[in-house]
Image: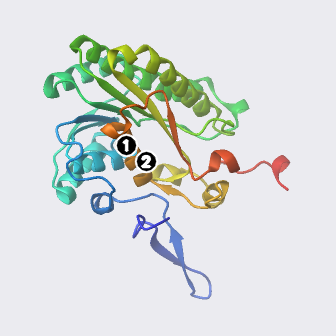
């Protein structure tokens, strides 16, 4: 996984009947300490004075972005459903990076709560500089078996929740005459996502929503872009079977997982002046998967096996 993945790659071992020790692969990604120490191509004060709001900041890619943005000098506000995870990230960034961040428990699918959160955040920090929508979730299942509740839950979180965050921020930027910058974490959807059709529909909706409002909101000096990750090592992938985890990296020609740092550094590019002429775009970070292979989260159906 490159030089960024260290102790989190192999964290335990198991013995067979003969007593041979075999490492157990840990796919949960980089720890807070590793994130705080990971080398970055960016200078330490790049984001001084900026305020970044990151949803889903308690875990995975959102957590990595929170660490990097804080390390680069930004005022970071993270939100998510689980307060204990948010507090853990806040405390870890303080302990390992010497930076203070803020957090707020929030369910993004609740539009009224998002309104209150944005109002409080804009009052405390002034117009924020960047909004990163990293919150989301899904489960893997054949589409024909989706329950109505399951379908609605994924669409409501990944599409509607992202939209509430975007709209509430954009309205306040407009009303205050301030520039804005939105970064939406989506997925590689060009060839579909078998066994994750609900997530594919929602993520595609976010992508084309972003492309649309990037034009509508250009007169307001609001940029909107997306990052489409491929197979990235986070605690989120640990829900999948051992076979799926083995096959995921084989679906890209580099034949490896990406790590959360890949996404965090891409987000900084979009947040910094380096991307001042970029809007309405999707930056794909997938090791070439979208040109090369398929991912089957619950196993490749026999029909498609050689």
Q: Secondary structure at mark 1?
A: helix
- The residue lying toward the viewer, choosing from 111 and 277, is 277
- The residue lying toward the viewer, choosing from 293 and 237, is 293
What coloring was used for the rendering?
rainbow
Mark 1 or 2: in front is 1
Residue that sits furthest to the top in the current view: 175
Q: Secondary structure at mark 2?
A: helix
Q: Which residue appears at 23% of the width and 14% of the height?
A: 177
Residue that sits furthest to the bottom in the current view: 18
Q: Which residue appears at 48% of the width and 27% of the height?
A: 280
Whether residue 294 is visible to the viewer of this picture, yes or no, is: no
Mark nearer the N terminus (1 vs 2): 2
**Which mark identifies residue 263?**
2
* Image spot of residue 133 (x, y percent): 39, 33
Does 141 sit left or right of 102 as displayed? right
How many marks the image carries: the answer is 2
* Image spot of residue 305 (x, y percent): 82, 53
Badge 1 is on which residue? 269
3D distance between C-alphas at marks 1 and 2: 10 Å
In the rendered image of this protein, does residue 262 appear above or below residue 279?
A: below
Query: Split into 4 quadrants, where in the image is the C terminus?
Result: bottom right
Q: Which residue appears at 61% of the width and 51% of the height?
A: 288
């Amino acid at each position: 996984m490159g030089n960024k993945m260290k102790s989190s790659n192999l964290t335990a071992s198991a013995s067979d009947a003969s007593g041979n020790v075999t490492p157990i692969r840990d796919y949960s990604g980089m720890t807070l300490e590793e994130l705080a120490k990971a080398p970055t191509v960016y200078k330490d004060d790049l984001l001084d004075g900026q305020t970044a709001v990151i949803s889903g900041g308690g875990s995975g890619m959102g957590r990595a972005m929170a660490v990097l943005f804080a390390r680069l000098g930004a005022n970071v506000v993270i939100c998510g459903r689980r307060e204990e995870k948010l507090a853990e990230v806040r405390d870890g960034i303080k302990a390992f990076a010497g930076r203070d961040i803020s957090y707020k428990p929030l369910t993004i699918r609740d539009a009224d709560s998002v309104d209150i959160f944005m109002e409080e955040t804009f009052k405390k920090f002034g117009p924020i500089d960047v909004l990163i929508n990293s919150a989301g979730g899904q489960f893997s299942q054949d589409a024909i078996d989706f329950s109505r509740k399951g379908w609605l839950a994924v669409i409501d979180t990944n599409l509607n929740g992202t939209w509430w965050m975007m709209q509430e921020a954009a309205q306040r930027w407009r009303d205050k005459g301030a520039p804005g910058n939105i970064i939406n974490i989506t997925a590689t959807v060009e060839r579909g996502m078998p066994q994750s059709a609900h997530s594919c529909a929602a993520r595609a909706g976010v992508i084309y929503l972003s492309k649309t409002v990037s034009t509508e909101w250009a007169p307001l000096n609001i940029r909107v872009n997306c990052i489409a990750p491929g197979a990235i090592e986070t605690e989120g992938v640990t829900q999948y079977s051992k076979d799926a985890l083995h096959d995921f990296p084989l679906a890209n020609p580099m034949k490896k997982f990406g790590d959360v740092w890949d996404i965090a550094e891409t987000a900084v590019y979009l947040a910094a002046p380096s991307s001042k002429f970029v809007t309405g775009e999707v930056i794909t970070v997938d090791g070439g998967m979208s040109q090369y292979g398929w991912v089957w989260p619950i196993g490749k159906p026999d029909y498609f096996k050689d």
